[in-house]
Image (cartoon, rainbow, N blue to C red):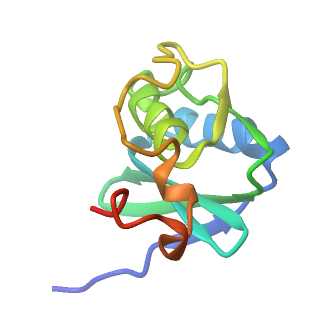
Amino acid sequence: MTSEIPETVPVETGNLIGKVEEFRDGGYRLVQINCSKIGDVYEINYSFDKDYRFRNLRITVTADTEIPSISGMYWGAFIYENEMHDLFGIRVRGMNIDFKGHLFTTAVKFPFSIAPSTLTKDEKP
């Protein structure tokens, strides 16, 4: 069995929709969208698959950046996008279904945007 290292392509936020369209038009399926906080920025990875070939698009944004929704091309992306908003505070423009901050109920607003050391004892899981 051989394995292939997935390709990850950094993309500017303004070019995200065009790149996602290329994947859609090329017959790729959306596998997942992942957000991670790294220092003061957020790294968002969009993962796609076609014929067992895994490819990623990566955008890096700050907390005040609004990103475009890809739910117009990949309908189910709204779940990932609402999750990014509710857990990280990422603003997503144009979601096909927007829970307006109510997909998840958390004790702390945008809990994954806060450094663990800044949470109080009562707020920690």
Q: Quadrant of the N terminus?
A: bottom left
Task: Give the number of marks.
Answer: 0
State the image coordinates of residue 5 (x, y, percent, origin top left): 42, 81
State the image coordinates of residue 4 (x, y, percent, origin top left): 37, 80
State the image coordinates of residue 81 (x, y, percent, origin top left): 50, 35
| Position of residue 79 in the picture relative to residue 11 (left or right) | left
Of 29 and 87, the residue lying toward us:
87
Q: From this viewpoint, which residue is outermost toward the left?
A: 1
Q: Quadrant of the C terminus?
A: bottom left
The residue depicted at 47 percent of the width and 52 percent of the height is 111
The residue depicted at 80 percent of the width and 45 percent of the height is 64
The residue depicted at 39 percent of the width and 30 percent of the height is 79
Q: Quadrant of residue 124?
A: bottom left
State the image coordinates of residue 15 (x, y, percent, origin top left): 80, 44
Of 73 and 110, the residue lying toward us:
110
Of 115 and 22, the residue lying toward us:
115
Q: From this viewpoint, which residue is outermost toward the bottom?
A: 2
Of 100 and 15, the residue lying toward us:
100
Q: Is 30 drawn above or below residue 50 in the view shown?
A: above
| Position of residue 58 in the picture relative to residue 33 (left or right) | right
Q: Is 91 drawn above or below residue 2 in the view shown?
A: above
| Position of residue 9 in the picture relative to residue 99 (left or right) | right
The residue depicted at 53 percent of the width and 34 percent of the height is 24
Q: Quadrant of residue 19?
A: top right
